[in-house]
């Protein structure tokens, strides 16, 4: 088996996605090691999850910086204190500067709670409900300078129920987030997924329509076997 990759995870909140990634690295599903967890919020619940798992943590508090550029420079220096293969944005609620993104492209991934390209940005679940959509979901994508606009690796999808609120919908979508984030990192760390010329390649084939997990079943029919 190839050497395990070194993952740095950036968070801003409770860290449930981080928790699922820690479990998958521990079980061996992901051939990777989370070497550092960094939060921009000193009170983020995910910091305790990391500490309980023996993972070093840092806080780079964005409120202490005068500009986005200054924050990003310190954040990048903090990441680069340790050898890092992949930067993982797991509920990291800061917009990153183009310079920062380019310095990691294509080695940075993000989870976003919508079926991209629908609803980049905030309040995704309320926007899907207000639009009368039948489905909502989540996407894992490589990060490019365009906000939530990078190539998608895998998605998960749930039905929107008639009585759903943004809170109930977010809860169901989150279950799928944990599955697809783990799967995307499993694929990246085993070398099955790479980003080449801004396209996602799975097993050497370009993904045109990202694979989608519905009711936790992987539907492979979105994969172009070329
Ligand atoms: C997730 O819904 C993620 O998609 C969004 O922020 C939330 C983070 O949740 N960007 P957690 O901190 O991983 O529990």
Image (tube, grey):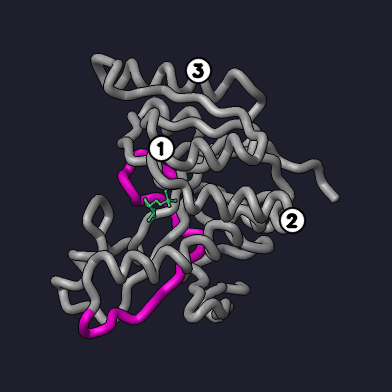
Q: Nearer the viewer, mark 1 or mark 2?
A: 1
29 magenta-colored: no
Left/right placement of residue 29 relative to residue 172 reads right
Question: Which residue is depicted at the point 72% across and 50% down?
Answer: 26
Other residues around mark 2 within 10 Å, as few (<14) / some (14–19) / many (≥20): few
Q: Name the outermost residue toward the right.
A: 1
User: Cα distance, mark 1 to mark 2?
Assistant: 25 Å
Q: Name the outermost residue toward the left.
A: 130
Ligand 1 is within 8 Å of the C-beta of the residue at disc 3: no
In the rendered image, residue 37, in percent from the top left (x then y), is placed at: 54, 34
Residue indicated by mark 3? 77
Return the disc, 1 or 2, that comes first in the chain's sequence: 2
Other residues around mark 1 within 10 Å, as few (<14) / some (14–19) / many (≥20): some
Question: Does residue 106 appear anywhere in the picture?
Answer: no
Depth check, front residue: 163 or 91: 163
Residue indicated by mark 1? 44
Ligand 1 is within 8 Å of the C-beta of the residue at disc 1: yes
Q: Quadrant of residue 12?
A: top left
In the rendered image, residue 137, in percent from the top left (x then y), is placed at: 37, 69
User: Cα distance, mark 3 to mark 2?
Assistant: 30 Å
Return the disc, 3 or 2, that comes first in the chain's sequence: 2
Left/right placement of residue 9 relative to residue 67 reads right
Q: Quadrant of residue 134?
A: bottom left
Quadrant position of the C terminus in the picture: bottom right
Asked if marks 3 and 2 touch (Cβ < 8 Å), the reply is: no
Return the disc, 1 or 3, that comes first in the chain's sequence: 1
Residue indicated by mark 2? 27
Question: Which residue is depicted at the point 46% across and 53% down?
Answer: 141
Depth check, front residue: 182 or 54: 54
In the rendered image, residue 2, in percent from the top left (x then y), is placed at: 82, 46
Q: Which residues are magenta?
A: 143-163
Vertically, is 226 above or below 105?
Answer: below
């Amino acid at each position: 088996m190839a050497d395990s990759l070194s993952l740095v995870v950036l968070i801003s909140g409770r860290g449930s996605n981080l928790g699922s990634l820690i479990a998958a690295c521990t079980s061996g599903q992901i051939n990777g090691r989370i070497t550092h967890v960094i939060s921009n919020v000193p009170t983020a619940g995910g910091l305790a999850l990391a500490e309980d798992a023996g993972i070093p943590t840092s806080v780079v508090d964005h409120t202490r910086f005068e500009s986005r550029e200054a924050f990003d420079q310190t954040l990048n220096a903090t990441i680069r204190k340790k050898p890092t293969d992949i930067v993982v944005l797991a509920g990291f609620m800061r917009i990153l500067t183009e310079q920062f993104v380019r310095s990691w492209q294509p080695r940075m991934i993000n989870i976003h709670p919508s079926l991209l390209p629908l609803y980049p940005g905030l309040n995704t679940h309320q926007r899907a409900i207000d639009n009368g959509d039948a489905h909502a979901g989540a996407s894992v994508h490589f990060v490019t300078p365009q906000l939530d606009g990078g190539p998608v690796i895998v998605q998960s999808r749930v039905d929107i129920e008639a009585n759903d609120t943004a809170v109930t919908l977010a809860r169901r979508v989150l279950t799928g987030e944990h599955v697809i984030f783990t799967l995307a990192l499993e694929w990246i760390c085993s070398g099955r997924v790479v980003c080449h010329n801004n396209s996602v390649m799975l097993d050497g084939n370009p993904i045109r329509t990202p694979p989608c997990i519905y009711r936790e079943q992987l539907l492979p029919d979105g994969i172009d076997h070329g």
